[in-house]
Amino acid sequence: MRRWLTLFLMLAASPAAAQSVVTSAAPDAVAVSVFRDPERSEGGEIERDWLNGFALISETRTIDLAAGESVIRFEGVAEGMIAVSAIVTGLPGGVVQKNRDAALLSPASLLDGSLGNRVHIRRTDRATGRVREDEAIIRSGPQGAVVLQTAAGFESLRCTGLPESIVYDGVPAGLTAKPTLSVTTRSPAAQRVTVTLTYLSTGFDWASNYVARVAADGRTLDLFAWLTVANSNGESFADARLAAIAGTLNKVSDFKALADVPQAPPLRLTCFPLGTGRYGIPPPPPPPPAPAFYVDNEGDNIVVTAQRSRAPMMESAIAVSVVAELENLGDLKLYRVPIPVTVAANGQKQVALLVKDRVPFRTIYRLRSSPGDSFESMEVERVLRMENKEAARLGVPLPSGQVAVFAPRGDESLLVGEGQVRDHAVGEKVDLVIGESSQVRVDIVEGAAPKMADDDYRVTVTNANPFAVDFELGFHVDPDPKLDKRLRKLPRRDGLLTWSIRVPANDSRSFDYRFVEPD
Amino acid sequence: MRALARTCGAVVFAALLAGQPVAAQDPTAGNAQGQLSVTIYNGGQALVQDIRQIAFPTGRSRQEFPDVSAQIRPQTVSFAADGTAIVEQNFDYDLLSPNALMQKAVGETVTLLRTNVATGAETRERAKVLAVNGGVVLQIGPRIEILRDDGMPVRVIFDKIPPNLRAKPTLSITVDSQRAGSRAATLSYLTGGLGWAADYVSLYDEKAGTVDVQGWVTLTNTTGTTFDQARTLLVAGTPSGQAANSRYRPQPQGNLRRAGTETAPREQLGDYYLYPLAERTTIANAQTKQVSFLDVSGVPAQKIYEYTVGGFDTMTEPRSAASVIKFNTSAKGGGLGDALPAGTVRFYQRDLRGDPQFIGENSIGHTPMGSELGLATGEAFDVKVQSTVVKRERMSPRIWRTSMSYLLTNARAQPVTIDLVQRGLDWYWDDTRIITESQKSERLDSDGTKWRVAMPANGEVTITATFETRY
């Protein structure tokens, strides 16, 4: 049932003896599961310049192991890899240790690592073009620049006005171009193995973008959603099994900090003061460029699903051949793209997430206020209301996202509203706020009409549309027995006492109540 | 001996080095570390013990110690060698740079090597540095000049480096030795920049109701120094001190539901569990190293949903309950059977194809064996809560009655259990009683009460309660 591991396998500690280094350059197959930015507000969009979501990447790799101890270096991984989350399975000898080495090769680390070592100083004569190389020993660290010991004595680099440069004989041990993940394993025999490397990586995000097309009769809509995936890593994932995970998961560690490439300190060559100021200490070099978390705005927008319908758009939904498949993953929802796709470096990709045609809906004009408020000509929210039930031709989990609503005008389809939707489980009522109406307005007047006292209120809703509208006014109030019966008896909707009324075309309706602010 | 190769390379420079004022261990000698032992604490500090072979002369001598941690806390250094007594310890950080070299050369004579830009011809002369104040004022024979005032190329060659200018901050100890000879000297010190935490990989099996837990210790070295072949010991604890400021301590966040009373079969030092690495290992600079310390499978685990209503509020939209995985760390009766050092627990669950997928993470503090853990992995898409204030009634000037209704919905195809907690029952001096409730709740404390509600698959449950508050 359970086994204890001693921290290292008990083999003779012969440091680095007979240790072979195997480099795994690229995966054979890869699966990418993308998670939304957990901090993003519901219905928020992908921030393409600064992707705050992440992905779980699972790669299979073929590795030829020698017998005995080997170090496997993994290359071609996402640059946003969170090394502490890496899991390596399939090694016959298990994992002795995992290392992420991030001492990077840079001008400053080259100088620092060569301290006390022999280098060459190359000087070019501007007059003759003659190049001379002299031997030197580096005597100072990278802070405050370079003092060299040469055959002549002690000198500084680049304070002379001569073109001069240090030429190194080699790269100090332990410096790498990029942070590198390696694992140490002890294989009982030389063999070819298939290992799985699974890790979390920053630099991904996804969102759902809904397009609702209202039918000509205004009673149903075709709901379509894009699954939009973005990758700001420099690596592309070819023919990947792609999935997106909806829902909110808990995150406690700072993924960006864990994946960060440490900034190589810039090497600043400083000198003693030169001249009377004209040739003083050279200005510090410009700050290093910001980390490469940008996405080209022209980044490839690859649309897997093709053929648009030729019929007028509002007549039928967008035709798609591939729709993501939904499965439950614990308390999350997993959308799987059923065909292998390429997640390109610095790119964004869209696949159909869901398609639901002819979903019945109602348009509601909605306002929420406190019973003690009064105002004039208040605009009200336009809400599309659907039931997320199979009987109402919906009945699927709706992950949060942006919604654009289009309505027909002859053969065209025009944008009539935009909004956000939160995560909706099956069975919930979906209220989609798509904007405000200036045709339907509300007055609440306190004690204005004749015979009305100070605490008497009158709500008047006016409809300037040539069609009847359904209006709801929800009151934020805790009902106590002293509350006016006219309010107290109102039915509840979304937890609020709500006055619902149908206002005929080009007409108005009103509602009176009395309200005393409780002490 | 590792340094031998590099030393040989430097022999070419023997002539150059002859006039070198640098004492004792020369940087060209490579890594001067001896037998290293590193003890790492959670708070980002470590105790380093370095046993070096030093040839002491009789009497007073100054010993330099290169290749100590670049983040050494020099005031914590202690030194011991047979037959020696410490005279003084110094930590010098007057760093060598062209500017420092020139400043220290005031009053000294240097060589100027001028290059003719037209012909490339070199001329050499000696100059005395008079002052370095915003420019270098030189005396060349009878003339006074400012260095490179004309912008023409001039090489300044110094005869020597002053002995107190160093490439790196240097620790030195002056000792009195009773006898000459090479022997082991033990140097120990505290350093920042070396820390560790645990990372757990937990594979949750919802059907079986189990969790497989793998534990890894994660060591992080940001000292700027590589520790070569060090015997390494990890201490699960943060002795109070500079680096152990309480704000760095991982907060338990209510994840420890019940503290255990069992002792794990691990080596202990006082109150701390010790995790020794079985082999010497090299902890490279800028390295994150992970070594497995725990692998347990099939630990019974339950999933439960939790939601806390903060006060008597009406919610206009339902909100998701937290999904929480609970298991215990007891050695008895189907627990994990170990103490867990503080760290991050990442949960995975297999999808329909059998591939593990990430489902959320949480952190734990140092957890004694026998504890009960409840770790929220995220919010449930399908399990939601909506509370409504049905009635709020003033019974007397000091007594209020509040009727609450909680609609709990479950869109999952399985029945689930939810812990619904109403908080805010005890604000200041008030006191709240439950008059009626549709299901018996468990009063947690004066401020909160909890209903454990079994919810049917694809169904909903409404809980109602009336509270009476006296102010």
Image (tube, grey):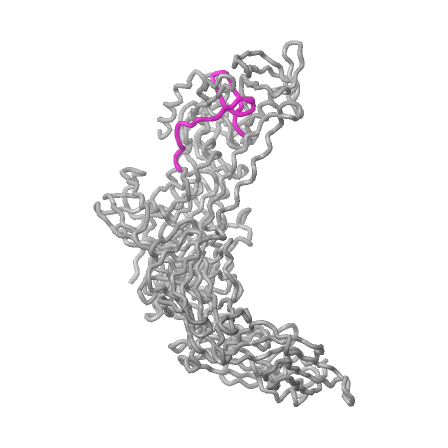
What kind of secondary structure does the magenta stretch mostly adopt? loop
Q: Is residue A151 magenta?
A: yes
The location of residue B198, given as percent across then percent down, is: 42, 54
The location of residue B157, given as percent across then percent down, is: 54, 18
The location of residue B167, given as percent across then percent down, is: 51, 29
Rendering quarter of residue B213: bottom left
Tell me the quadrant of the picture where the N terminus of chain A can be found. Answer: bottom left
Query: B82 or A214, which lies in front?
Result: A214
Q: Is residue A101 magenta?
A: no
Query: B80 or A211, which lies in front?
Result: A211
* A280 shown above or below B187: above
* Whether residue A314 can be seen here: yes
* B267 shown above or below A122: below
Q: Give the number of callouts.
A: 0
Q: Which residues are magenta?
A: A145-174
Query: A309 or A84, which lies in front?
Result: A309
Query: B233 or A77, which lies in front?
Result: A77
Asked if residue B362 lies left or right of residue A433, the reply is left
For the view shown, which residue lies furthest in the top direction?
Answer: B142
* Whether residue B388 can be seen here: no
The location of residue B18, given as percent across then percent down, is: 46, 16
Asked if residue B360 lies left or right of residue B123, the reply is left
Tell me the quadrant of the picture where the C terminus of chain A can be found. Answer: bottom right
Asked if residue B410 lies left or right of residue B113, the reply is left
Asked if residue B21 lies left or right of residue A188, the reply is right
* B431 shown above or below B373: below
